[in-house]
Image (cartoon, rainbow, N blue to C red):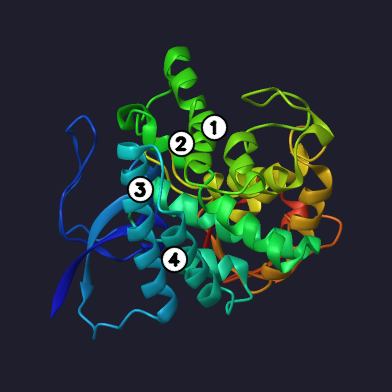
């Protein structure tokens, strides 16, 4: 028996069959149901800004959620309720917040491969809630790699998870706008840093944790907000949160753009490391993340599929791949890049 499933393009394979019509945002029919998909059609859908489609899949036995997935869904629900509470009362139940986040962290800490962890936790729930949890977990790992104490790592986990709590007081129409924000709208969004700090302080949260909500958009070169702090003026927790925030945001699908591959994002962070983000943290983060590249199943910008078999120390973002037709060293093919990571 077949079933109707909505999946992101990254999970679709050539030969899959559409179970529903694909229609553009303007109402134009792009593909009809029952079409057997080709690579060219998938590429054209991506160019049209279509990132999820309905396909026919053979029904299989339902796999019960893992303890990690179950805890993740429960934590998302808790954070959603806390954002609602913040919008209504300008504070949150911090005791409930800590209990939920720490339980999820305990379960997720059993997965050493950070890329596999982030991939397994992806759902189609509200972006802000997923981003909050993702940044908290990422920031905690960076803090551990940096050698911070257990207490400090827990503070970073909590501050990272609630760094965007101020967005509960920002107009959701602006937050979810698919087009470029106007200057006035962007000014409204930027208020979430001060609003978040106020919410956390009203909730009795310790200063180092609350400060992460206030300073996570500050940048080393002074280009950030709300105060334009530079270098050492920015506390280490907020510098860690900034790296986690940028990485997670760029590798996650949004209403106005598709996600970037881990490789492209890490290369962008590497190129940026002497400007806006802490270069020492970027170096640490990149070196650790390289350990998770080997064996990745990837899709290239020309549609070819391959597996990472060797990461070059001098050019880690241009690895050696095993393709169906043989081996390909991306160091010698500047015209190609890894567009998607399909399996880690």
Quick check: 187 above or below 308? above
- Callout 4: 10 Å neighbours few (<14), some, many (20+)? some
For the point 62% across and 43% down, which residue is it?
Answer: 212
CA gap between label 4 and label 1 equals 23 Å
Marked residue nearer the N-terminal end (4 or 1): 4
**What residue did someone put label 1 on?**
193
Dividing the image into 4 quarters, which one contains the N terminus? bottom left
> Is 220 situated above or below 312?
above
* Identity of the residue drawn at 43% across and 47% down: 253
Q: Secondary structure at mark 2?
A: helix
Measured in 3D between alpha carbons, the distance from the residue under mark 1 to the one under mark 2, in whole angstroms, is: 6 Å
Measured as percent of width and height from the top left, residue 242 is found at 65, 43
Q: Is residue 104 left or right of residue 20?
A: right
The image shows residue 97 at horizontal and vertical percentages of: 45, 58
Check disc 2 and report the residue beneath it. 166
Label 1 with label 2: CB-CB less than 8 Å: yes
Crowd rating for badge 1 (residues with CA inside 10 Å; few <14, some 14–19, many 20+): many
Mark 4 in CB contact with mark 3 (< 8 angstroms) = no
């Amino acid at each position: 028996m077949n079933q109707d499933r909505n999946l992101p393009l990254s999970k679709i394979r050539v030969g899959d069959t559409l179970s529903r019509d694909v229609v553009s945002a303007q109402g134009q029919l792009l593909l009809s149901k029952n079409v057997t998909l080709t690579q060219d059609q998938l590429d054209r859908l991506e160019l049209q800004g279509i990132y999820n489609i309905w396909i026919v899949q053979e029904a299989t036995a339902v796999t019960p959620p893992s303890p990690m997935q179950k805890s993740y869904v429960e934590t998302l629900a808790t954070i959603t309720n806390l954002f609602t509470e913040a919008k209504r009362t300008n504070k949150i139940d911090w005791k409930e917040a800590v209990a939920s986040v720490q339980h999820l962290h305990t379960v997720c800490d059993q997965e050493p491969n950070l890329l596999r962890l982030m991939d397994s936790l992806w759902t189609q729930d509200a972006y802000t809630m997923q981003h909050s949890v993702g940044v908290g977990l990422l920031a905690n790992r960076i803090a551990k790699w940096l050698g911070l104490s257990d207490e400090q790592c827990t503070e970073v986990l909590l501050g990272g998870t609630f760094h965007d709590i101020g967005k509960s007081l920002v107009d959701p129409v602006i937050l979810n706008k698919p087009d470029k924000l106007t200057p006035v709208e962007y000014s409204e969004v930027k208020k979430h840093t001060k609003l978040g700090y106020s919410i956390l302080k009203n909730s009795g949260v310790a200063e180092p944790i609350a400060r992460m909500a206030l300073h996570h958009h500050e940048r080393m070169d002074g280009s950030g907000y709300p105060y334009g702090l530079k270098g050492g003026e920015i506390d280490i927790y907020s510098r860690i949160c900034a790296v986690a925030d940028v990485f997670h945001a760029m590798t996650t699908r949004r209403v106005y753009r598709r996600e970037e591959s881990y490789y492209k994002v890490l290369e962008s962070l590497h190129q940026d490391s002497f400007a806006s983000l802490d270069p020492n943290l970027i170096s640490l983060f990149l070196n650790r993340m390289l350990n998770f590249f080997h064996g990745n199943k990837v899709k290239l910008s020309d549609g070819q599929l391959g597996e990472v078999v060797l990461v070059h120390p001098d050019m880690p973002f241009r690895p050696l791949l095993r393709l169906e037709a043989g081996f390909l060293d991306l160091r010698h093919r500047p015209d190609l890049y890894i567009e998607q990571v399909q399996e880690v």
